[in-house]
Amino acid sequence: MQIAPSVHRVGNDVIASYLVVGDDGVTVVDAGLGGHWREFVRELTRLGRSVDDVKGIVLTHGDTDHLGFAERLRAERDVPVHVHAADASRARGEEKAHASFGPWRPGATARFFAYAAMHGGLRTRYVREVREVADGDVLDLPGSPRIVGLPGHSPGSVAVHFPALDAVMVGDALTTRHVLTGRTGPQPAPFTDDEAVALRSLDRLARLDARWVLPGHGAPSDAGTTEVVRRVRAAAGALPR
């Protein structure tokens, strides 16, 4: 699914990964679930590309619903997998997340876990080898992605900014569809390690001034980073304490 010029989505508003397509190949941001592999290959084929055109994967963080087919690409095609150093052990399966659910509704939560189960979420394939990145790094990959540290959801949570495309992939630094409540619109993401730190990190996102904000869960937004961050903070202020 095309989101913007050169930017395409695999998955849906429940769980998504993104492809940035250039003349020099494809960069994948997040890898969804293992069961998204076929959809990923179909999208590449639709674009006249193949798995061999993928030059690298960048993970916004190391949670299991973002690792998906990353290890398959690394093991079978020698595609490097980049993740912030603070989440490297999580991506390798050496460390587990300890975040609480937060608000939830039975129906929405059941639908999310059912979707995950049907798409391989019960059989996580961790990434055996990763390339560690840091805040401010510009990677030698199609689109020249820049790493923007956004700790809070996890210690190594990042945004992946493509300045030339006016787009930023934010992973779970925020969400536009809360998978445990079904509520839509910009808001804090569930399963966050440190909610206060995550909200403070959004200052860095707002300063990017990118038009397209592309979350790991929920609909993409073209309202711009400043406005999306404002709405997240408004939603956070309305949450019961």
Image (cartoon, rainbow, N blue to C red):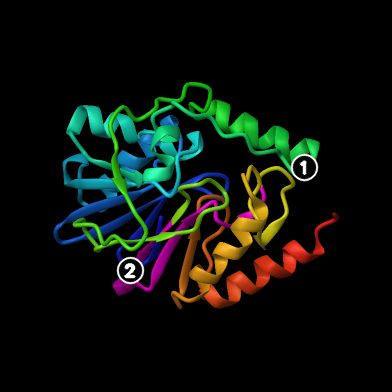
**Residue 184 rendering spot, x and y as whole percentages:** 68, 58
* Horizontal side, residue 62 vs residue 48: left or right: right
Q: Secondary structure at mark 2?
A: loop
User: Which one is in front, 155 or 175?
Assistant: 155
Amino acid on which the number 2 mark rests in the picture: Pro
Q: CA distance from mark 2 to mark 1?
A: 35 Å
Task: Pick the quarter of the image with the C terminus.
Answer: bottom right
**Residue at numbered disc 1:** 104
**Residue 52 rendering spot, x and y as whole percentages:** 16, 41
For the residues bearing labels 2 and 1, Cβ distance under 8 angstroms: no
Residue range highlighted in magenta: 159-178
**Residue 53 rendering spot, x and y as whole percentages:** 17, 47
Mark earlier in primary sequence (2, 1): 2
**Residue at numbered disc 2:** 5
Question: Residue 4 lies in magenta, yes or no?
Answer: no
The chief SS type of the magenta part is strand
* Other-residue count near label 1 (Cα within 10 Å), few / some / many at <14 / 14–19 / ≥20: some
Q: Secondary structure at mark 1?
A: loop
User: Which one is in front, 82 or 164?
Assistant: 82
